[in-house]
Amino acid sequence: MAAIAIIDDNPDQSTTVQNNIEIGLLELGSELEVITATPFREVQEYFSFIQDKNVVVLILDEKLNDQSNDDVGPVEYKGSQLISILRKQLKDFPIFALTVIHTDEDLTSKYSEYDDIIGRNEFYSDSEKYIPKFWRAAKNYMKENSDAFSEYNRLAREVSAGISNPNSMKELQALQAKLELPFSGFDDRNAWLKKYEEQISELEKLNQLLKSKLEDS
């Protein structure tokens, strides 16, 4: 099932937000799961976490480095530092900030990298405004990526059949980059066909997974 994930170094705080979102999603008729996690020691763990937990929206606290959740001590980064790293790979992924210090200069300087920066008190007092925003972001992200996989498959089949044109090639390469698929050149059609056959079954599985997420939400 697709999930909204809350990252916060304060488990009590994140549980309160989780409960609020779960109630709001239930009222909206959504079956999206809401999960929580404390900050990961290694930033690369976020990418595997997103994949393994079928995360489609991230909600980050700013002061991720405030409390310790292990014997090592707090992590060494804030939410506004984490998002810049995540955005290097997750260009269109929905990421929100939900924090008491929503006017902090370090955070507001990264405003363009977030889908929204929300004050925690504003969220609690007007959750009916923000929870539908999380829900729409999740559905739009899943639909967009499902559509992108479908379009990639369509264009790839045209290439394999030899009926593509230069514009199709450019579009295919752009989709390949968007979906973070391994790039292969198209000068040698036989090489492309071999690479395409290797990828197509996996792509269809991914597309079906995205469609099932949409149905579950």
Image: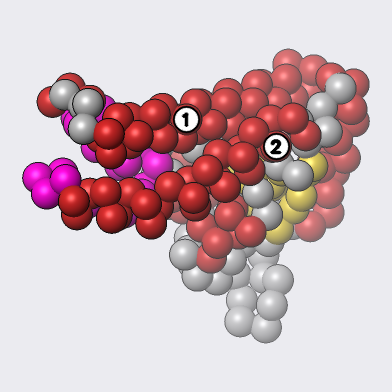
Image: 115 above or below 7? above
Question: Horizontal and vertical percent for residue 18?
Answer: 81, 42
Q: Residue furthest front?
A: 161
Identify the element where label 1 is drawn: helix
On-image quarter of the N terminus = top right
The amino acid at mark 2 is Ser
Residue appearing at x 48%, y 63% in the figure: 43
Residue appearing at x 63%, y 43% in the figure: 209
Whether residue 6 appears in magenta in the rendering, the answer is no
On-image quarter of the C terminus = top right
The image quarter containing residue 31 is: top right
The amino acid at mark 1 is Ser
22 and 118: which one is in front?
A: 22
Say whether residue 151 is left or right of residue 3: left
Residue appearing at x 58%, y 55% in the figure: 51
45 and 123: which one is in front?
A: 45
Question: Horizontal and vertical percent for residue 142?
Answer: 59, 32
Say whether residue 150 is left or right of residue 61: left
Residue appearing at x 43%, y 47% in the figure: 200
66 and 137: which one is in front?
A: 137
> In terms of sequence position, does the residue under pointer 2 or pointer 1 come before the other?
1
Say whether residue 102 is left or right of residue 180: right
Identify the element where label 2 is drawn: helix
The residue indicated by pointer 2 is 212
| Distance in Å between CA atoms under marks 2 and 1 | 14 Å
176 and 24: which one is in front?
A: 176
Question: Horizontal and vertical percent for residue 184?
Answer: 22, 51
The residue indicated by pointer 1 is 150
Q: Few, some or many C-alpha atoms within 10 Å of disc 2 (few <14, some 14-19, many ≥20)?
A: some
The image quarter containing residue 117 is: top right
Q: Is residue 20 visible?
A: no
Numbered range of the magenta stretch: 169-189
